[in-house]
Image: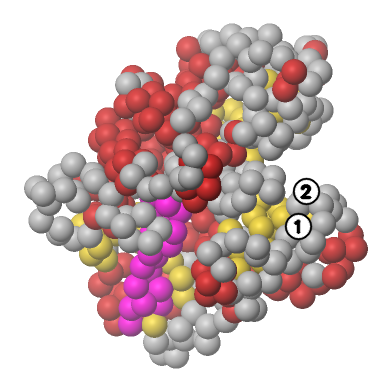
């Protein structure tokens, strides 16, 4: 059913119009079909300050938007009719969902709009990205209320042992696996696979590769509705990169391949080692040169940087290698249909639009500029010194993004300043806090 069909349906009563904030959370409103008709033409007003909100609505600073100079006005959200879906669990006539993004000046720092612009630049270079995403998360036999009451300590995970690909735990949790798969049908999420990861309650769900905004749209929907599904079942999930020092870190892996306008893979060359073309090498060179400047997009919260503690299977630096999971950029596949690169840098807390935009922008820039990559990492990357690195702390990541001519060129100077400013505001808020571990270590004898 199209948006126009739904509006014209006499049985249709309400629809949900949603946009994605900087954190990857869906924010929107339930509107009548009578209102939807006008919104489809003219957009729906929502204050740009929404893009300055942290997940719990702490207002972070964006100059001119959420500071002392702001008037907190509304700007229009433009509906994307191609994104029409059905809401799971809602009754017919109330179950339409349509995604949107900001227009006008606010589009300059709207995540979905950022990805649209990056894809347009790739298209102008004659390149068509195809990408999929893997999402790691932890499922708990807790409600959000019980987790909060426990101070987020000693939480009961859905399973109790490390269990990578263990079918026993999959079968034990059949209701969860099947509920996720069923939920994805009305949401038009192309779920490719799910499996157990290395840790209690630790799971992975994978979005099939696609083109345009669709894979990022789908991952946004998956993250948001996994939360809703868990809560409907009396459970909860987290996407924090490091929710406890006793568990592995959680990430989003982005798999990218490239075609030309004729549909031919530009990554594949059977005459070269591992079939890796020169164009693919340039893409890797761009990732190595530029993704470090975009660390903040891949690691957007104060918790993100705890993921890189030793022993967490996070990338050791901006390295690459064929079928090598101890590198940051892992080359996967063997033929024109499967050869791709996996960006293993982003944490599970990242915004899918910004993660995809960062990966595609850096790689395509490498092709345009013909940037050669460093030597391939052979063997265990954790035992070697990487030739170049990403930002290891939030202040460093903020400084690198703010100072990056590449980021300003590809993502826009207003986005760079807005995003840097909100992250700086968050960092300054959290550095005033005194963690329990510091009290335990230093209160008596420090």
- Residue 44 lies in quadrant: bottom left
Q: Secondary structure at mark 1?
A: loop
Side of 401 where 68 appears, left or right: left
Task: Give the quarter of the image for residue 225.
Answer: bottom right
Question: Residue sitting at 57 percent across and 74 percent down?
Answer: 146
Read off the residue under disc 2. 198
Q: How is the image coloured?
A: secondary structure
Magenta span: predominant SS is: strand
Image position, residue 285 (x, y; %): 57, 15
Instruction: Read off the residue under disc 1.
Output: 200
Q: Can you give x and y, in whole percent of width and height, for residue 442 in the image?
A: 48, 41
Q: Is residue 29 magenta?
A: yes
Q: Is residue 62 visible?
A: yes
Question: Is residue 351 visible in the rendered structure shown here?
Answer: no
Residue 373 against residue 346 in the figure, above or below: above
In three-dimensional space, the C-alpha distance between marks 1 and 2, rounded to whole angstroms, equals 7 Å
Q: Look at the image and say whether residue 259 sits in the magenta stretch.
A: no
Badge 1: residue crowd in 10 Å (few <14, some 14–19, many ≥20) = many
- Identify the element where label 2 is drawn: loop
Please give the label number shown on residue 285.
none
Magenta part of the chain: 15-32
Tags 1 and 2 touching, CB below 8 Å: no
Q: Which sits in the foreground, 426 or 35?
A: 426
Q: Residues within 10 Å of mark 2 (few under 14, many from 20)?
A: some
Query: Residue 424 in the image: x percent, y percent?
Result: 32, 38
- The residue sitting at 56% across, 51% down in the picture is 240
Of residues 163 and 160, which is closer to you in this image?
160
- Residue lying at the far right of the rendered structure: 168
From the viewer's side, name the closer residue of 445 and 394: 445
- Is residue 235 rendered to the left or right of residue 104? right
């Amino acid at each position: 059913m199209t948006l126009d069909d739904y509006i014209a349906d006499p049985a249709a009563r309400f629809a949900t119009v949603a946009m994605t904030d900087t954190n990857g959370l869906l924010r929107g409103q339930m509107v009548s079909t009578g209102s939807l008709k006008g919104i489809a033409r003219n957009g729906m007003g929502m204050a740009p300050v929404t893009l300055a909100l942290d997940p719990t609505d702490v207002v972070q600073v964006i100059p001119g938007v959420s500071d002392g100079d702001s008037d907190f006005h509304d700007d229009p959200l433009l509906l994307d009719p191609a994104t029409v879906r059905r809401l799971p669990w809602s009754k017919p006539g109330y179950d339409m969902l349509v995604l949107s993004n900001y227009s006008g000046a606010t589009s300059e720092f709207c995540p979905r709009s950022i990805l649209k612009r990056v894809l347009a630049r790739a298209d102008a270079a004659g390149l068509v990205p195809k990408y999929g995403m893997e999402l790691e998360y932890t499922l708990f036999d807790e409600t959000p209320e019980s987790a909060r009451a426990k101070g987020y300590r000693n939480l009961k995970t859905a399973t109790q042992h490390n269990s990578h690909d263990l079918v026993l735990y999959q079968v034990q949790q059949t209701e969860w696996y099947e509920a996720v798969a069923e939920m994805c049908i009305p949401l038009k999420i192309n779920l490719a696979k799910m499996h157990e990861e290395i840790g209690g309650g630790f799971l992975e769900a994978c979005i099939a590769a696609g083109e345009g905004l669709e894979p990022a749209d789908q991952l946004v929907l998956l993250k948001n509705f996994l939360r809703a599904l868990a809560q409907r079942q009396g459970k909860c999930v987290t996407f924090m990169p490091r929710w406890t020092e006793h568990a592995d870190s959680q990430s989003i892996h982005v798999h990218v391949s490239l075609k030309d306008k004729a549909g031919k893979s530009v990554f594949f060359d059977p005459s070269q080692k591992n079939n890796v073309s020169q164009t693919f090498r340039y893409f890797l060179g761009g990732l190595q040169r530029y993704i470090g400047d975009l660390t903040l997009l891949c690691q957007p919260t104060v918790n993100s940087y705890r993921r890189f503690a030793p022993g967490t299977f996070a990338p050791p630096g901006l390295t690459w290698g064929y079928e090598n999971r101890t590198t940051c950029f892992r080359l996967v596949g063997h033929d024109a249909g499967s050869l791709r690169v996996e960006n293993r840098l982003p944490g599970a807390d990242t915004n899918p639009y910004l993660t995809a935009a960062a990966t595609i922008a850096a790689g395509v820039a490498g092709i345009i500029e013909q940037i050669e990559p460093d030597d391939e990492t052979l063997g265990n990357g954790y035992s070697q010194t990487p030739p170049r690195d990403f930002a290891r702390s939030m202040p460093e990541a903020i400084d690198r993004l703010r100072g990056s001519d590449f980021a300003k060129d590809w993502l826009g100077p207003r986005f760079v300043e807005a995003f840097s400013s909100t992250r700086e505001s968050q960092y300054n808020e959290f550095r005033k806090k005194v963690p329990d571990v510091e009290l335990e270590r230093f209160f008596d004898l420090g």
